[in-house]
Image (spheres, coloured by chain):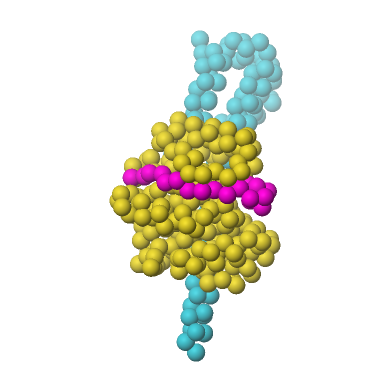
Amino acid sequence: MYKNSWIIIPVYNEEQVIKDVLNDVLKVFPNVVCVNDGSSDDSATEIKKTKAHLVNHPINMGAGAAIQTGIEFALQDKAAQYFVTFDADGQHKVEDIAPTLKYLQGNDLDIVIGSRFLGEVKNISKIKSRFLQVAKLFNKITTKIDITDPHNGLRVFNRKFAESLDITLHGYAHASEIVEHIRSQRFKYDEYPVTVLYTDYSLKKGQPMLNAINIVFDLFFNRITKK
Amino acid sequence: MITIQTLLIAGFVILLLMLLSNPGNLKIQASKKIIGVLFVCAAIFFIVFPEKSNDIAHMLGVGRGADLLLYILTLAFIFVSLNFYLQIKEEQNKNVKLARKIAIIEANQVEKSKKSNQRK
């Protein structure tokens, strides 16, 4: 079951939770590749305790780079047809993957992005909620693609999309780059409701809101220098 | 009369073209070198004939030669900064591709030895 699907999990300093997250995913999906993006803690050791494939970045390059590496590793499997990006910090639920994948297959789409705003949001702060709404508006304006949760790390896409993707914004802006890629290559996309759990642990690790400035900057330059 | 404004706007338009161009573009590369040489020539000229900057400034509608040089300096600074930013981005991309290749080769090796260990 799910032999033609690969779960891609970028990891940066998640030694406390990564083993449990991986084991949860592995209960359902046999093909999991964990890209360790130059963690300074024992994430790699923890990953090796599981049956997940481990790819170590020699230097820290960013979540976007880690996802691209994971995709290229998974593409080596000629039988791989579906690819799923999934967060390492326990914010996502494994149970959300299968329905999202089914939705993609059933509607013959190229990519489905999970949305916490279509599903449940547990414990989100008012500021963060407001902030995500602004991010959504920004995405809509710049990409003309109306997605309620563009920065959601849970995405399911097919091989065609995976092979065409070449993430060059190696940090957190990759999320916007993926949406831009959908727009420029006219891929068939949709969203699907997923649950995002804001635990004390994941709140500490979350993207700082100031990062939005970096993302806007990088996306702007990337957009106008795209060859 | 060509005013300083026309000149500066033309300068920024050129910077924009630089930004939008393909980094590997040879024409742009050569143009950058030409601009560099022109700058050095201009610098030497104004060092030898500092009063001339006043004359040229007046021709362009600027009060003092020093002000003119300041405007040119601003343009030059942005030019240099932009150039660095673009080059660094390119280098960063190359680095990432290299590191990725190494990471995947290493991971494949580990997989291979795991498989052969299992067979033993």
Q: Please say if B2 is above or below A18.
A: above
Q: Please say if A168 is above or below A9.
A: above
Apparent colour of chain B = cyan
Image spot of residue A185 (x, y percent): 35, 43
Q: Is residue A189 visible?
A: yes
Image spot of residue B70 (x, y percent): 67, 22
Identity of the residue drawn at 58% across and 33% down: A130
Bounds of the magenta segment:
A188-206
Image spot of residue B117 (x, y percent): 52, 84
| A162 part of magenta stretch | no
Q: Is residue A177 visible?
A: no
For residue A206, side relative to residue A195 (left or right): right
Number of marks drawn: 0
In the figure, residue A18 lies in which quadrant?
bottom right
Q: Please say if B2 is above or below A34.
A: above
In the figure, residue A90 lies in which quadrant?
bottom right
Identity of the residue drawn at 57% across and 13% down: B60
Identity of the residue drawn at 54% across and 32% down: A134
Image spot of residue A149 (x, y percent): 49, 41
Identity of the residue drawn at 55% across and 15% down: B5
Residue at the far bottom: name it.
B120
Q: Nearer the viewer, residue B57 or A31?
A: A31
The chain letter of the yellow chain reads A
Q: Nearer the viewer, residue A125 or B104?
A: A125
